[in-house]
Image (cartoon, rainbow, N blue to C red):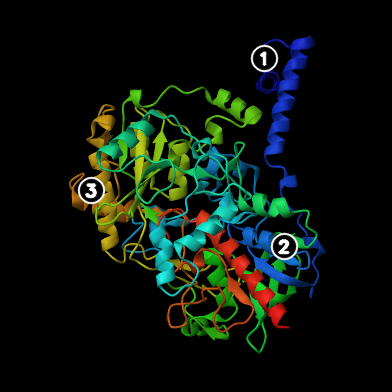
């Protein structure tokens, strides 16, 4: 038999007539639906080919991510201002649009593919002893590759910022900014006064209807943590997500796409900013940028340069421009323009990739076939493909019961029996060793499995980012310094003990949960499930939750660790600001995507106010 012929014509007999027509109509409808998912019409045009050396703009925004897109949208509301957005990546790939495929985005073209430096205290059980650090490299930045969870953080987070001398960043002030962004569409929140409804960002909510979701919430209630609808400092809830009609609503699509008809908004892709141009008076005058395969251009900013390149990219660009720690810049051969602690104060949330729990078959309801789910998605944008499963269920707990505010965020991932996709992808992007993957998969082939991921919210440890060289194309050196402070290990251990208590409650115990030995390299000598075993496991498998922050710290001039003031202006340099997660003095207690959008919106409002004041003075 000719195998090629069988592939070309797998059916034993041809379909003809009306059935054939209906079949082809269905196939065509599916193909059209697929094309609509990733239409570039949702985004601004790439105008990089039109840029010329010495072109001038009023504002140059570096980065189109969670903050940068919001900044450019707001500033371009003034038709008299010409705004240029420079993005090192390209349009997001079609895969980014499909919520359930979020883990497949890491390590590809939409990702900078950073890695943290090896350490003797963390990431010991991951391949090469390194934590992988995905960051978005496309329109929308990390909002194009993240889990789409919209969590603001709590009142204490922002009030602490204000208490450190950052006027206007208290909770009541930032709450109004959050509301300006939001367009909450969830029926469950129709009577809530906590969220905005007139903003650009669509926020939706779904209940996965997983049997285990209900059991987890019931078990948490028995341990003193309520089930809530709105995000609160303590409790379990289904998080809002930036998903609209079954597709990811990244910030490039929402904030730049919806402003794409403004003639004063220019977006350039594949544009890597190599340095900021700073004159002898220490004033930012523009940027040097390499666009795709073209020669380097110098682009001028009449008013300001705004860095929104993220907690890795913004300090890297500042240091390449001579703004950073004097000793380090001299070591890599860069002339010092301003001695500032750029790259210091690095903070990140990290989670322990476990406990890994085997449950009975009754814990997971029967699902439609994958083919049915794909049809449902491509024709109607509904079903499991339009969601992220149990992972939208989050819990905020305080393991020490010493405050209403949390120190651990609980995240959950469910693997159906004999899972063929999710487990492999998550293991790949976390860099888990083959030994651990095999041990987990062997159990999953026989039973559904569940990972509880206790996430450290307020790390004591601090890292830093340095330049590898003065070559802007070299990736920076990332010292995450996880668990430099041993108290962080103990807090994660307390999170694991919370999980173990949950497993002993009646709502979960009925599904016969069994903690699985993950065969973690280096932990074999410890008694399984002992405290020392868990400490070893934490140092081996805990890894980033993709929330780096703090590397261009906001603070008063009296703060020796500050890089920007409370209006996000870089100390000692005129007409240069930073607006992204890097300005956080302390990382917030939750996912950082929503706070980054708030920082962009609030920062842009400050720019508008400051230039209105200057105009008035003139």
Q: Can residue 135 be seen here? A: no
- Pointer 1 with pointer 2, Cβ within 8 A: no
Assign a secondary structure to mark 3. Answer: loop
Look at the image and tell me in which quarter the N terminus lies.
Answer: top right
Q: Residue 591: x, y in percent?
A: 46, 53
User: Callout 2: 10 Å neighbours few (<14), some, many (20+)?
Assistant: many
The residue carrying mark 1 is: 11
Q: Name the disc covering residue 224, or none.
A: none
The residue carrying mark 2 is: 76
What residue is shown at x 70% (from left), y 18% (from top)? 9
User: Callout 1: 10 Å neighbours few (<14), some, many (20+)?
Assistant: few
Question: Of marks 3 and 1, which one's residue comes earlier in the chain?
Answer: 1
| Image side of residue 355 versus residue 418, left or right | left
Marks 2 and 3, Cα distance to the nearest angstrom?
58 Å
The residue carrying mark 3 is: 524
Question: Of marks 2 and 3, which one's residue comes earlier in the chain?
Answer: 2
């Amino acid at each position: 038999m000719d195998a090629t012929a069988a592939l070309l014509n797998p059916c034993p007999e041809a379909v003809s007539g009306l059935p054939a027509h209906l079949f082809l109509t269905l196939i065509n409808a599916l193909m059209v639906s697929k094309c609509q998912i990733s239409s570039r019409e949702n985004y601004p045009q790439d105008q990089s080919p039109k840029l010329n050396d010495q072109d001038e703009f009023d504002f140059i925004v570096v980065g189109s991510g969670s903050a940068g897109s919001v900044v450019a949208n707001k500033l371009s509301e003034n038709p008299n201002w010409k705004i240029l957005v420079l993005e090192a990546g390209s349009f997001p790939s079609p895969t980014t649009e499909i919520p359930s495929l979020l883990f497949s985005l890491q390590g590809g073209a939409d990702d900078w593919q950073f890695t943290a430096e090896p350490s003797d205290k963390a990431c010991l059980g991951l391949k090469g002893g390194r934590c992988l650090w995905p960051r978005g490299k496309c329109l929308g930045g990390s909002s194009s590759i993240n889990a789409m969870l919209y969590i603001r953080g709590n009142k204490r987070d922002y009030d602490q910022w204000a208490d450190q001398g950052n006027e206007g960043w208290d909770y009541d002030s930032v709450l109004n900014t959050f509301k300006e962004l939001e367009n909450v569409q969830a029926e469950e929140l129709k009577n809530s006064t906590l969220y905005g409804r007139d903003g650009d960002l669509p926020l939706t909510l779904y209940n996965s209807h997983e049997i285990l979701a209900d059991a987890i919430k019931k078990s948490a209630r028995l341990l003193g943590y309520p089930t809530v609808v709105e995000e609160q400092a303590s409790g379990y809830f289904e998080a809002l997500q930036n998903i609209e009609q079954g597709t990811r609503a990244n910030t490039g699509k929402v904030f730049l796409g919806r402003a794409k008809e403004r003639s004063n908004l220019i977006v350039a892709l594949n544009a890597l900013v190599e340095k900021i141009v700073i004159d002898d008076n220490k004033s930012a005058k523009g940027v040097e940028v390499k666009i795709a395969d073209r020669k380097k251009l110098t682009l001028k900013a009449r008013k300001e340069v705004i860095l929104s390149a993220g907690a890795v990219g913004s300090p890297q660009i500042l240091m390449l421009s001579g703004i950073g720690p004097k000793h380090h810049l001299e070591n890599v051969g860069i002339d010092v323009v301003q001695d500032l602690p750029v790259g210091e104060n690095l903070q990140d949330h990290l989670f322990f990739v476990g406990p890994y729990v085997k449950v009975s078959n009754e814990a997971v309801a029967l699902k439609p076939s994958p083919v049915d789910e794909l049809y449902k998605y491509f024709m109607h944008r509904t079903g499991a493909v339009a969601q992220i499963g149990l992972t939208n269920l989050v819990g905020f707990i305080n393991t020490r019961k010493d405050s209403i505010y949390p120190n651990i965020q609980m995240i959950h991932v469910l693997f159906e029996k004999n899972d063929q996709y999710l487990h492999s992808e998550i293991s790949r992007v976390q860099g888990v060793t083959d030994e651990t993957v095999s041990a987990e998969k062997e159990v999953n082939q026989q039973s559904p499995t569940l990972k509880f991921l206790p996430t450290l919210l307020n790390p004591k440890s601090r890292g830093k980012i340095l330049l590898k060289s003065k070559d802007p194309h070299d990736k920076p050196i990332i010292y995450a310094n996880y668990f430099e402070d041993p108290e962080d290990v103990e807090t994660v251990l307390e999170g694991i003990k919370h999980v173990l208590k949950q497993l002993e409650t009646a709502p979960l115990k009925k599904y016969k949960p069994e903690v699985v030995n993950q065969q973690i390299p280096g932990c074999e000598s410890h008694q399984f499930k002992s405290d020392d075993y868990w400490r070893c496991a934490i140092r081996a498998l805990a890894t980033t939750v993709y929330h780096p922050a703090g590397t261009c710290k906001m603070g008063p001039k009296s703060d020796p660790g500050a890089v920007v003031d409370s209006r996000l202006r870089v100390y000692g340099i005129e007409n240069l600001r930073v607006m992204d997660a890097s300005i956080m003095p302390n990382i917030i207690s939750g996912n950082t995507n929503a706070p980054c959008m708030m920082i962009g919106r609030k920062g842009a409002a400050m720019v508008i106010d400051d230039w209105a004041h200057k105009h008035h003075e003139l």
